[in-house]
Image (cartoon, helix red, strand yellow):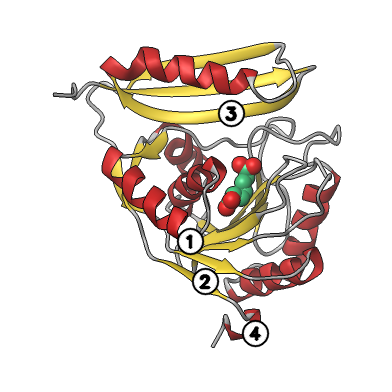
Amino acid sequence: MPSKHLYSIRMRASARERHISGAERIIPEERIDATVSGLITRALSKGCAPDTIVVTLDSLKDVAPIQHRALDVVMLSVPDVRSGREMASRILQSLGVSDMAIELAMTHLDRGVSPSGNNMRGAMVLDASTGDRLEQDRERGVRASRFDWSDDGEKEITRLLTDAGLTHFRTREALALATKVAHAPGMVAELCWSDDPDYTAGYVASLAMGYVRFPVLKHRGNGKGGRAFFVDPDVFEMEAFLTYLQTRPVLITEAGQCRQVLDPKKFFT
Ligand code: PML
C-alpha cells in the first residue's frame, strides 16, 4: 500500500546558464528513488549536456493537495502559424485580454522573454488590460510548481490524449500545469508555445474555455517560446498569486473532455 507521505520533486537543468529542461512531480515517499533517477535521465537526454541539474525534494508534510479536474482539451485544427495566432488572439480577446496585451505577449515570446533575449524558466505575468509586465524577476519569471497528475488521473488522461493522437509527454505535462495555473487567483488566461525548436504546438488556457491547443503557433526551428500569464488588474494581488502557484500542492485527479474542432470558424458558434 503506497505511503500517504507525499513529496514534491522539482527538476531543472541548464547549460551555459540557459534553461534546457524541467519537470514537476508529487509522489509518495517510496517512489523517490525511481522518480529522481527518471528525471535525471530525462535531463541528460536533451541532446545538449547540462552543466547543472538541480533536483529539489520537499515533504508536503501534512498539507493535503488541492484536487482539480483537468481543463477540457479542445484541439483546434489550424494550418499555419498565422491562422493559429489569429485564432489564439481572438480567444484571448473574448476572455477579456486587450489587443495591446496580446501583441506585447506575442512579441516577447517571439524575441525571447527575458531582457537578455533568452527563454525564461518561468512565465511572464502581464496585466490583461495594459500588457505591463508585473513579474519582479524578468530573467526567471514566475514558475508554477508543486503539481502533478494522480495515478488514476494520469491513466485517464493518457488514454484520452492517446485516442486523440496526442502521445507526447509535453501535452500531458502542459495540461497539468495549465490546470493549476487556470485556478490561480486573479488569473484570466495563459498563452504558451514551446521553446523546443522541434515542437511547434501551443495553447491558450483558461477556466472559461479550457485548454485550447494549436498544432502550430510558431515555425519549426524557432527556439524561442515560453508562457504568458494574463491577470485581471482589478483583483490581482501578486502575493496571493505567487503563494498559490509556488507553494500550494495540486493534484489533477480527473481528466476533462477532449474534442477536436476541424473548422476554426466554428469554434465560437
Ligand atoms: C512546453 O512544455 O514546451 C510547452 C508545451 C506547449 C504545448 C504542449 C502540447 O499541448 O502539446
Residue at image point 49% right, 44% down: 177
Does residue 144 lie above or below 185 as drawn? above
Please name the residue that numbered disc 3 is placed on: 22
Please name the residue that numbered disc 2 is placed on: 260
Going from the N terminus, do you reach mark 3 or mark 1 first? Answer: 3
Going from the N terminus, do you reach mark 2 or mark 3 first? Answer: 3
Inspect the image, locate mark 4, and give the three-letter code of the amino acid beneath it. Answer: Lys
- Foreground mark, 4 or 2? 2
User: Dot 3: what SS?
Assistant: strand
One can see residue 155 in this view: yes
- Foreground mark, 1 or 2? 1
Would you say 63 lies left or right of 210 here?
left
- Foreground mark, 1 or 4? 1
Looking at the image, which residue sits at the far bottom?
A: 269
Going from the N terminus, do you reach mark 3 or mark 4 first? Answer: 3
Q: Number of marks in the image?
A: 4
Q: In which quarter of the view is residue 265 placed?
A: bottom right
How many C-alpha atoms fall within 10 Å of the one at disc 4: few (<14), some, or many (≥20)?
few
Does residue 123 lie above or below 31 as drawn? below
Inspect the image, locate mark 2, and give the three-letter code of the amino acid beneath it. Answer: Gln
Q: In which quarter of the view is residue 218 placed?
A: bottom right
Q: CA distance from mark 2 to mark 3?
A: 29 Å
Q: CA distance from mark 1 to mark 4?
A: 21 Å
Query: Residue 120: horizontal and vertical position, in percent?
Result: 71, 34
Inspect the image, locate mark 1, and give the three-letter code of the amino acid beneath it. Answer: Ala
Does residue 92 lie above or below 37 as drawn? below
CB under 8 Å between discs 1 and 4:
no
Going from the N terminus, do you reach mark 1 or mark 4 first? Answer: 1
User: Dot 4: what SS?
Assistant: helix
Please name the residue that numbered disc 4 is placed on: 265
